[in-house]
Amino acid sequence: MIAGIHHCSLLVEDLERSLAFYCGVLGMAQDAARPDLGYAGAWLLAGNQQLHLLRLPSPDPVAGRPAHGGRDRHVALVVDSVERLRERLEAAGIPFTASRSGRPALFCRDPDGNALEFVEIAIAVGSGSLSPDRSVRCGSKSRS
């Protein structure tokens, strides 16, 4: 039934500041097809998926979150080069941490404290697949 994730929404306080981060620092592109939804926001393209920025009040505290984004709820985005991203984050003065798993991945927070993970994964051209099939039924430890 579930074929994939279409988009993830993040609450932001200052849309222009967020667009400067996501488009300027991370190099994402904005989808101009976003209709007027009655509040400010932006749809950003992430491959075949989207990241929706919603300028709405956030009930979540910014202070007191784990220093390492991997220990907090987060969105994981695929990048073609963790090293190139590291250089961009350093140039922008944005703190980040490396994945503790040993794989090529970084974590940082956006200007509103949302945790982001960036994973370097080679995608076979035309396959769209990010990983081998390791699926199991929910609640089961064995493959279905």
Image: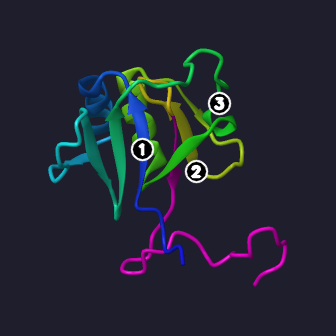
Q: Mark 3 falls on what kind of element?
A: loop
| Residue 26 falls in image quadrant | top left
Q: How far apart are marks 3 and 2 (CA)?
A: 15 Å
Residue bearing the label numbered 1: 9
Tell me how far mark 1 sits from mark 3, CA to CA. 21 Å
Q: Name the residue under label 3.
A: 68
Q: Residue at 28%, 23% (x, y): give it.
A: 17
Left or right of 103? Residue 53 is left
Rendered residue at 31%/33% (across/down): 25
Q: Position of residue 104 (x, y in %)?
A: 58, 50
Overall secondary structure of the magenta section: loop
Q: Disc 1 vs disc 3: which is toward the camera?
A: 1
Sequence-earlier tag: 2 or 1 = 1
Q: Is 107 displayed left or right of 68 in the figure? A: left
- Position of 110 relative to 85 (above/below): above
Residue wearing tag 2? 104
Q: Is 105 in front, or is 113?
A: 113
What amino acid does circle 1 point to? Answer: Ser
Mark 2 neighbour density, 10 Å: few (under 14) some (14–19) many (20 or more): some
Label total for image: 3
Badge 1 element? strand
Quick check: 86 above or below 93?
Answer: below
- Given residues 119 and 70, the one toward you in this image is 70
Here the colouring is: rainbow
Q: Which-is-in-front pick, marks 3 and 2? A: 3
Which mark, by number, is residue 70?
A: none
The crowding category of the residue bearing disc 3, from other C-alpha atoms within 10 Å (few below 14, some 14 to 19, many at least 20), is some
In percent of width and height, residue 93 lies at 41, 20
Identify the magenta region: 115-144
Q: Which of marks 3 and 2 is nearer the N terminus?
A: 3
Secondary structure found at label 2: loop
